[in-house]
Image (cartoon, rainbow, N blue to C red):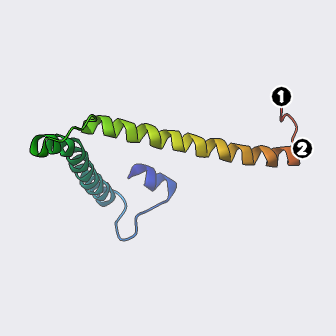
Amino acid sequence: ADNLKKSGAFIPGIRPGEQTSKYIDKVMTRLTLAGAAYITFVCLVPQFMIMAWDVQFYFGGTSLLIIVVVIMDFMAQVQTHMMSHQYDNVLKKANLKGYGR
């Protein structure tokens, strides 16, 4: 709330100061609760599948979360790399001093 106030930004419909702080805390609490419930669900579903239907499932819920996070990070790195090549062409055309040292 203080950073918003210092930068001159605000949340429409919410008064600056204490009300903004309470609003941000309320939103963060709801997001954290929803995220925790989702992660719990994802981690427990494979265990329930194994117990209920005697299904052979070699990855637990935690392993699935790790795999998904690694894949998402890899995709973000590839996108960043692709974007950097686009800017390389722009920098070459601009003929900037100090480029290519």
Mark number, residue 52: none
Question: Quadrant of the rendered structure where residue 77 is?
Answer: top right
Q: How many marks?
A: 2
Amino acid under label 2?
A: Asn
Q: Position of residue 47 (x, y in %)?
A: 16, 40
Residue type, mark 1 in image: Arg
Residue beneath disc 1: 101
Foreground of the two, 31 or 9: 31
Percent x, y for residue 61? 25, 39
Q: Nearer the viewer, residue 55 or 88?
A: 55
Q: Nearer the viewer, residue 101 or 77?
A: 77
C-alpha separation, residue under disc 2 versus residue under disc 1: 13 Å
**Image point 48% across, 52% down: which residue?**
6
Could you classify mark 2 by the number of other residues whose Cα lies within 10 Å: few (under 14), some (14-19), or many (20 or more)? few
User: What SS does tag 1 mark?
Assistant: loop
Name the residue carrying label 2: 95
Please give left or right for residue 41 compared with residue 24 in the image: left
Where, quadrant-wise, is the C terminus in this rendering?
top right
Residue projecting furthest to the bottom: 13
Is 36 on the left or on the right of 16, as rendered? left
